[in-house]
Amino acid sequence: MLDAILLERHGVPAVAIVTDVFRATGEAMAASWGMSGYRFLDTPHPIANLGDKDLDARADGLVEPVIALLRA
């Protein structure tokens, strides 16, 4: 989350992705860095135990939402 916020502050479009259990933490971090309402994505938790095939499928499902946020 912080990486995306810092990139955005330097004019580099970025999209943060967190797992859903960390959505509230991401919102709090954005607020603490003066970016309340910063839009980011979440994906179901956990991801650490996913195999390559399942992780790739999860990532594939995030491509369009990432593009949409970058275009917004």
Image (tube, rainbow, N blue to C red):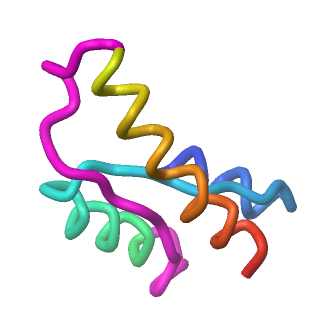
Q: Which residue is drawn at 51% across and 75% down?
A: 39
Would you say 70 lies left or right of 2 here?
right
The front one of 4 and 54 is 54
Would you say 41 lies left or right of 8 here?
left
Residue 25 coordinates in the image, percent (x, y): 23, 62
Q: What stretch is highlighted in magenta?
A: 33-52
Residue 66 drawn above or below residue 35: above
27 magenta-colored: no
Residue 45 drawn above or below residue 65: above
- Decide whether the magenta segment is chiefly helix, strand or loop: loop
Q: Looking at the rendering, which quadrant does residue 68 occupy?
A: bottom right
Q: Which residue is drawn at 46% across and 84% down?
A: 36
47 magenta-colored: yes
The C terminus, quarter of image: bottom right
Q: Can residue 5 be seen in this view?
A: no
Q: Looking at the rendering, which quadrant does residue 3 occupy?
A: top right
